[in-house]
């Protein structure tokens, strides 16, 4: 399913996230985890494609989030699955900073 940017949703202050931290927000009914890595912001759907559990509470190792349930890994920057038991990538969302606020694009 392709994403088209229809609306930008204001979610949190840019200053709320320190390097290596994340926050989970609601974007149009989706739980979205926003990570700050290397001074940039990345947003992925907070769901493991293996079993549907949340993943944001897992360990962040470099640019990979490790699912706390079964150890699947996903690249926070691209959503790409990095190891089993998951085989499907996780959805990503565009993020931008406007006037010191993070905004995430909602699905159209």
Image (cartoon, rainbow, N blue to C red):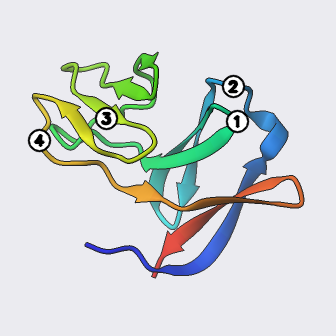
Left or right, residue 94 beside residue 48: right
Query: Disc 1 or disc 3, which is closer to the eye?
Result: 1
Q: Residues within 10 Å of mark 1 (few under 14, many from 20)?
A: few
Q: Could you tell which of marks 1 and 3 lies nearer the N-terminus?
A: 1
Left or right of 47, for residue 57: right
Q: Which mark is residue 87?
A: 4
Disc 1 and disc 2: Cα gap in Å?
A: 7 Å
- Judge left or right: residue 57 versus residue 105: left
- Of 29 and 37, nearer the camera is 37
Image quadrant containing the N terminus: bottom left
Position of 46 relative to 94 (above/below): above
Earlier-in-chain disc, 4 versus 2:
2
Q: On screen, 10 above or below 42?
A: below
Q: Secondary structure at mark 4?
A: loop
**Residue for badge 2:** 19
Do the residues under discs 1 and 2 have CB atoms within 8 angstroms?
yes
Badge 3: how crowded within 10 Å, few (<14), some, or many (20+)? many
Which residue occupies 70% across, 36% down?
39
> What residue is shown at x 87% (from left), y 53% (from top)?
100
Q: Is residue 16 left or right of residue 94?
A: right
Position of residue 96 relative to residue 68, above or below, is below
Residue 14: percent from the left, percent from the top?
Answer: 79, 44
What residue does disc 3 label?
74
Identify residue for label 1. 39
| Comparing labels 1 and 2, the label whose residue is closer to the camera | 1
Give the mark, 4 or 1, whose residue is nearer the N terminus: 1
Q: CA distance from mark 4 to mark 3?
A: 10 Å
**Of residues 108 and 18, which is closer to you in this image?**
18
Q: Which x, y percent locates residue 107?
A: 45, 74
């Amino acid at each position: 399913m392709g994403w088209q940017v229809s609306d930008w949703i204001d979610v949190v202050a840019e200053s709320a996230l320190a390097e290596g931290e994340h926050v989970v927000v609601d974007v149009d009914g989706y739980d979205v985890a926003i990570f700050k890595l290397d001074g940039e912001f990345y947003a992925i759907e907070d769901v493991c494609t293996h079993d549907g559990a949340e993943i944001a509470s897992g360990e962040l190792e470099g640019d990979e989030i490790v699912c706390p349930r079964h150890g699947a890994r996903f690249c926070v920057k691209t959503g790409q699955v990095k190891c089993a038991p998951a085989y499907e990538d996780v959805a990503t969302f565009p993020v931008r900073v406007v006037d010191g606020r993070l905004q995430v694009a909602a699905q159209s």
